[in-house]
Each structure stands twice: as C-alpha cells, then as structure tokens.
Image (cartoon, grey):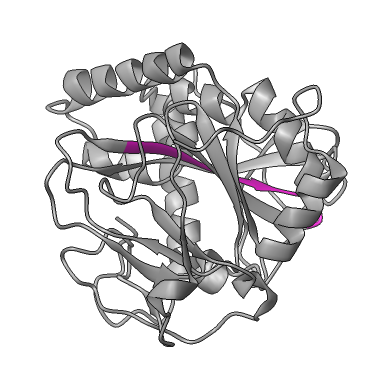
Amino acid sequence: MLESLELSRGRLSEAQVARYQKDGFLFPLSVLSAEKAADYRRRLEAIERDWLSADLPLPLNSYKRVNAQAVLPMAYEIGAEPTVLDVIEGILGPDIMLYSVEFFIKEPQTRHVVTMHQDLTYWGMGGTSGMVTAWVALSAATPASGCMNFVRGSHKNSILPHADTFDDDNLLSRGQEIAVDVREEDKTAIEIHPGQMSLHHGLTIHGSGPNQTDDRRIAAVIRYVRPDVAQESGLPDYAMPLRGTDTGGNFIHYPAPAADFHSDALEIYETIRTKQAAVMMAGAKGNTEMY
C-alpha cells in the first residue's frame, strides 16, 4: 500500500499541482478516514439492498452509475465533502461546481473491464482543463481488483479517435476504446485504499482490468467543473454550485435531493439524463442509452 501524499493543511502543495499538470493525474491522496469510507460503503450497500426491488422508473444501477447526486443525498454528501473540495481547489481554483457522482463497482471474480479511453471524448466540452475527476476508494483498488491504469502525460494530446464496441464485459456506456495501441510499460497502476483518492484530467488515457478478488471494488467517481466550462453542443447542461461563485452561467442549477429517490429528484434526474444522453451518445450506432 502506497503512503498518501502529504497535504499542506489539507490542500495540495505547488509541487503537487505541478505534478498533476505534468502527469495528468495525482495519487494517493488521503481525504477520508478509513472509518468514514467504510460508512459510505455501508450506506451505499443499504441503498442497494433496500431499493433493489423498488418500483423505480429505471433500474437501480442506472441511478448509481449516472448522476447519483441528483437522487441520493449520500452521493451529494460525498461529492460535497470539504476535505475533497479542499484538494480540488488546488486544481480548479475557488469556484467549484459538482457535475456528477457515480458509484463505479466491479463485483468480485468478474470479467468486467474498462477499456483505455479519454473521459472527455463524448461529453461535448472539448479538451477542457476546467474539469477534474476525483476517484474516491470505498474498497481496495489494487491491480488484482481492477484498479485504474493511467498513461503519464497523455492529457497533453487532444481528444484522440475512439471506437465503440458495446462489449458486454465493458463497463463504459459505449464500450469506447481509444483507437491507438497503449503499451503495458506505459501504464501506471493507480492503487488506492479506502479513504484515499486519485485525481485525473479528462484527457488522460486510462482503463482498468477485471476484479479477480473476493471483494467488491467500489469507488465514488466525482466530476467537478469550473464555471467557465461550457457545453459546446448548444444543449443545456446541469451542475450544482459547491464553492465560490458561478461566474459563467453555463449550467442550470438544481437542488440536492431531499430524500432517496424523492419524486421531485426523479423528475430532475430524467431531465438531466435526457439532455446529457443526446450529447454523450450522439453518433452511437448501438444502444443509445447511457446505462
């Protein structure tokens, strides 16, 4: 287990920010206690248990995988964690908006993978540096459990060609895979443990292998944006202000959910889902549902 990078009063140092800008990623960063990470996992698994058979408009997995912050107070809570935001300020500055929270889970002893890709490929925001992904481990992410692999410095490329596979074992919505060969020696394994976090740029090439362990690999994947980021498609997009001021006016704001799957939250969720799917699945020749 790698020792967490030392923060300065909970914030990134200038050297750590420079390292992120050079590599396109940074890890491991301790942002939650192991006990708090375990509590978030317990609460997530209680939601899975209690709502699995509920009469929801969409499958429960859809809500976990896309914009969970819109329907689950617990997802919004982890996205708004002050210790996480203190770190994010070093990358985005004082004005921070929550774009999405998703719970990315690989079940034990399964074949599911994430092929090598760049996050920003289909999001309609170009190659912006005004978005950063925080990947918070709620269980151990190791090479054996299918931790992420990053390609150092790959964020300095523009958006590269991708191919859609729609493979059943691929956890991405389009099964997208970057159309260039990535050598194994160019991959850095991002091993992190409960309460630790990694950061990566939206252009950083990354992917992950199957979970060959007997425990679930669970992460809260949180996307943050600066107010100056804008949707290039011309369609409306949505975000939740967390710190500072929304000086851009490029996103429609919406409230945190009042309760798990509250009726008002479900209505907001469906509006966001429809608008974002029109951007993210544009041109897809297979299933056009995000998840």
Queried whether the magenta region covers residue 117, the answer comes back as no
The answer to whether any part of residue 57 appears in the image is no
Give the magenta range: 218-228
**Residue 235: x, y in percent?**
61, 65
The answer to whether any part of residue 190 appears in the image is yes
Q: Quadrant of residue 228?
A: bottom right
- On-image quarter of the N terminus: top left
Report how many numbered discs are placed on residues in the image.
0
Queried whether the magenta region covers residue 225, the answer comes back as yes
- For the point 17% across and 21% down, which residue is it? 49
Q: Main secondary structure of the magenta part?
A: strand
Q: Quadrant of residue 204?
A: bottom right
- For the point 44% across and 73% down, which residue is it? 185
Query: Is 211 on the left or on the right of 251, as rendered?
Result: left
7 or 50, nearer to the observer: 7
**Residue 242: x, y in percent?**
72, 31
- Image vertical order of residue 170 relative to residue 67, above or below: below
- On-image quarter of the C terminus: bottom left
**Residue 156: x, y in percent?**
69, 75
- For the point 36% across and 41% down, which residue is it? 141
19 or 80, nearer to the observer: 19
Query: Is 229 on the left or on the right of 198, as rendered?
Result: right
184 or 94, nearer to the observer: 184
- Image vertical order of residue 170 relative to residue 146, above or below: below
- Image vertical order of residue 111 relative to residue 212, above or below: below
